Image: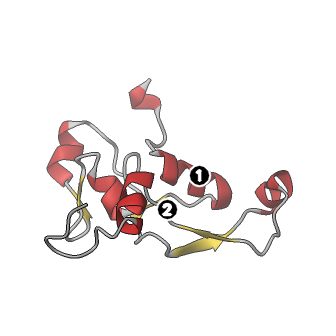
Amino acid sequence: MFRRAVRYLLLPEYLTYRLDRRAVTDPCTAESTGFMRKALPTWHTARCKAARCRRNTARCDPKTANTGSDRIEPAMAKAWGLSPDTLVVAGTNDQYAGALGAGNCRPGHRH
């Protein structure tokens, strides 16, 4: 089944893909898979090769959370009751967003 997969997507990636048909990922989220080096951000080629992932299967375009991706697909806008002018942005996991909202955004700061 894994060999036939077209993409492996985490939840934020899946939602943006469904809404605008572009596979984008937040580097922080992608790093949690062990396949991305967030600091660059680039994919670990050796790890992807070891996992036998095809080039485009496990890899999405890295975009910082809250970065615009594209407009919502017209069919999705209609199905979800949204304006066709709705912009789709890269998301992140709730743990990262929650930590930022709690003020954990300065070196050495802990809550």
Tag shown at residue 91: 2
Q: Residue at x 80, y 60 (%)?
A: 77
Question: Looking at this view, is 22 or 64 the one in front?
Answer: 64
In this figure, which colouring scheme has been used for the structure?
secondary structure
Q: Quadrant of residue 88?
A: bottom right
Quarter of the picture containing the N terminus is top left
Q: Quadrant of residue 42?
A: bottom left
- Give the labeled residue for mark 1: 15
Label 2–label 1 contact, CB within 8 A: yes
Where is residue 33 shown, x and y percent of the image?
29, 45
Q: Quadrant of residue 97?
A: bottom left
Question: Looking at this view, is 1 or 72 the one in front?
Answer: 72
**What kind of element bears circle 1?**
helix
Q: Which amino acid type is shown beneath numbered disc 2?
A: Gly
**Alpha-carbon neighbours of circle 2 within 10 Å: few (<14), some, or many (≥20)?**
many
In the depicted structure, whether residue 4 falls above or below residue 76 = above
Question: Looking at this view, is 91 or 49 the one in front?
Answer: 91
Task: Locate residue 4 relative to residue 88 in the image: left or right.
Answer: left
Q: Residue at x 33, y 70 (%)?
A: 103
Q: Residue at x 39, y 30 (%)?
A: 3
**Alpha-carbon neighbours of circle 1 within 10 Å: few (<14), some, or many (≥20)?**
some
Q: Which amino acid type is shown beneath numbered disc 1?
A: Leu
Where is residue 11 shown, x and y percent of the image?
50, 46
Please report whichever mark, 2 or 1, sits nearer to the chain's N-terminal start.
1
Where is residue 59 shown, x and y percent of the image?
37, 53
Where is residue 4 shown, x and y percent of the image?
46, 30
Residue at the limit of the structure toward the front, as seen here = 111
Task: Locate residue 99 relative to residue 38 in the image: left or right.
Answer: right
